[in-house]
Amino acid sequence: GAIVLVGLAAQMTGWWLVASRHRDVWHVLPPILGVMGVVALLVATPFEPTVGRTAQLVAGLTAGLALYAGTRAFVWLAVRWGPFRRNVVEAYAEAATVPTARALVLSLALSVPGEELFWRGLAQGWLSDTALGAGGAAVAALALYVVANLPSRSLPIVAGAVVGGAVWGALAWWSGGVLAPLASHILWTGLMLVFPPGTGATDGTHREGEGP
């Protein structure tokens, strides 16, 4: 439990540095999340999946594709609604200086595995051993995950944490492991980086505000 709280504080601090101190997200978040993932591997209870690997992969990839389609639909609607227009347009439309290839490596090798191992593996697994049970653990882990991303002060980041976290937590609950949520998160993130919502195609650069 103490390790979960330390990880929560670390991720919140990382987003605070990015949002309030204007630090480069690609220099701050991937190392933090990567370390969180390593710690989770060292201390988490070994996973005992309740379904086969093939079923986990199929479910995870299907959920990742559906989540990406839903994200594109959300962005298409959000940019047409005044209160969200500026935030979403800034997040998805402004060109960033980080090449897509580098963003993919940092995200798919550090950030995504780190988040899944820590939040859906260590945190959700630990909570499931409490009086909350497996279902309550999924909800509690989702709440902590959303709180960890709130300091980003970014609608796309927080919305992604809410919706994506719910999907990945449900996959972990269903499968008893992290393979399904990891596959879903990797596919969603990869598509978001290569084909950012609102652009229709990649121009070789990552779009600002999508996060690791």
Image (cartoon, rainbow, N blue to C red):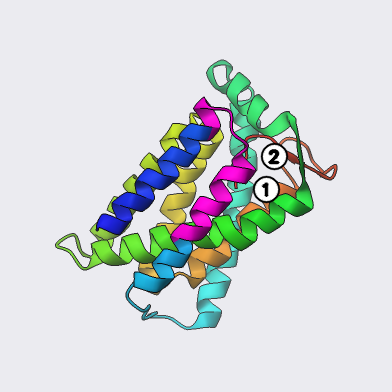
Q: Which residue is mark 2?
A: 197
Q: Amino acid at mark 1?
A: Met
Q: Secondary structure at mark 2?
A: loop
Task: State the extent of the magenta-drawn residues as a range.
Answer: 18-36
Q: Secondary structure at mark 1?
A: helix
Q: Is residue 63 above or below residue 87?
A: below
Location of the N terminus (image quadrant): bottom left
The x and y percentages for residue 147 are 36, 40
In the displayed structure, does residue 127 sit left or right of residue 181?
Answer: left
Residue drawn 72% across and 30% down? 93
The x and y percentages for residue 80 are 63, 22
Which quadrant of the figure has residue 96? Answer: top right
The x and y percentages for residue 151 are 44, 33
Q: Which residue is mark 1?
A: 192
Residue drawn 18% across and 59% down? 132
Q: Is residue 127 above or below residue 147?
A: below
In the displayed structure, does residue 103 sit left or right of residue 184?
Answer: right
Gap between marks 2 and 1 measured at Cα = 7 Å
Q: Amino acid at mark 2?
A: Pro
Give the prevailing secondary structure in the magenta stretch: helix
Which quadrant of the figure has residue 39? Answer: bottom left
Whether residue 166 is visible to the viewer of this picture, yes or no, is: yes
